[in-house]
Structures are given as C-alpha cells and as structure tokens.
C-alpha cells in the first residue's frame, strides 16, 4: 500500500481531456487511475498524475512506513497488463477532512478571514502567566 500526496492545488484542478481508460481485466472503465511518470527528488517515492472525477492532479506516491505520519490517502495501486505505468487506484483510507482542501467551486479566501484563532487551554494558561496582575496581599505595612 502507498500514500498519495497531492501537489496540485485542489481548488484549481486541470480538466481531463482524455477519454475514460478501460481496464483489460474487468472490461469496465475506471474513473480513478494513476500514471507514474518519474521518481521523487529524494528517490523514496514516485511522481504521479492522478485522474479522478474529471480532474487531473499531480502528486507523489510513497510507501507506508511504520511510525511515520500519513499524508494524503492510503491507496492500493493495481498496474495494468498492457501498460504497467498506468495503475487503477483502490482507496483504502480516505484523506482526513482537515487535509482535504477547499472545493473547486469555492473561491480562495472565503473559508475564514483574519488571523488564525489560537485559543487552546495551554495558550490561555501561558497568557495568564505573562499578563495576569499579581494577587494583592490583604494588609499593607504603611
């Protein structure tokens, strides 16, 4: 199993111009395919082009490693007999909602305005430690 990291901005997909690819084994068209076109700069993964839902996305496929965080989706690639660099994609684990960027029809910048909201308990405790006024003792000497 491998993970696919997306490098094309999801908000601006490239429309696919090719027709649907047909798998020789099943005889049905697959709407989710990957074309392997190179090796990543670090040599640990493969550069891929992925066609799904009428869009083409550029990304990288990397093997899963124990103890390493998963970035993107966990997929199983099934190479085709007639062209092994073209693989059918079977999604094992979808990308978490936080990793999924805004949709193509949502313009950029409409998700939120202003700075990030950092209001965790740890943030509040540290804020109080720095800016809180010291507690007054009950009686003064003078």
Image (spheres, grey):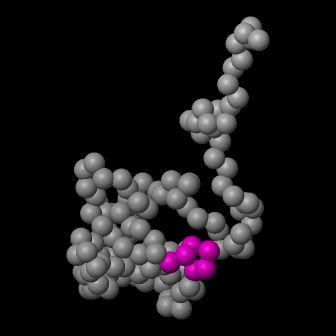
Query: Was residue 12 drawn as part of the magenta stretch in this picture?
Result: yes
Horizontal side of residue 89 vs 56, given as left or right? left
Residue drawn at (28%, 79%) of the image = 41
Image position of 9 (left or right of 141): left
Residue 8 pos. (x, y %): 50, 78
Tell me if I can see residue 26 in this picture.
no
Q: Nearer the viewer, residue 134 or 102?
A: 134
What residue is rendered at 60% in x and 32% in y? 129
Residue 115 in which image quadrant: bottom right
Please say whether residue 94 is one of the residues in the magenta stretch.
no
Q: Position of residue 58 (x, y in %)?
A: 44, 79
Q: Is residue 39 left or right of residue 102?
A: left
Above/below status of 44 relative to 112: below
- Residue 3, by quadrant, is bottom left
Q: Which of 136 and 126 lies nearest the eye of the viewer? A: 136
Residue 112, how many percent across, how many down? 73, 60
Q: Left of 64 or right of it: where is 11? A: right
**Rendered residue at 25%/75% (across/down):** 42
| Magenta span of residues | 8-13
């Amino acid at each position: 199993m491998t993970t696919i990291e997306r490098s094309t901005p999801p908000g601006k997909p490239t429309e696919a111009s090719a027709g649907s690819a047909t798998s020789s084994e099943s005889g049905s068209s697959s709407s989710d395919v990957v074309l392997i076109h190179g090796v990543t700069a670090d040599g640990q993964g493969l550069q891929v082009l992925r066609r799904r839902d009428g869009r083409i996305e550029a990304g990288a496929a990397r093997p899963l490693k124990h103890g390493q965080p998963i970035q993107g989706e966990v997929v199983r690639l099934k190479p085709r007999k007639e062209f092994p660099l073209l693989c059918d994609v079977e999604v094992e684990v979808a990308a978490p909602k936080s990793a999924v960027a805004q949709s193509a029809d949502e313009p950029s910048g409409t998700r939120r305005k202003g700075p990030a909201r950092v209001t965790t308990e740890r943030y509040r405790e540290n804020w109080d430690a720095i800016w809180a006024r010291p507690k007054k003792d009950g009686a003064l000497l003078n």
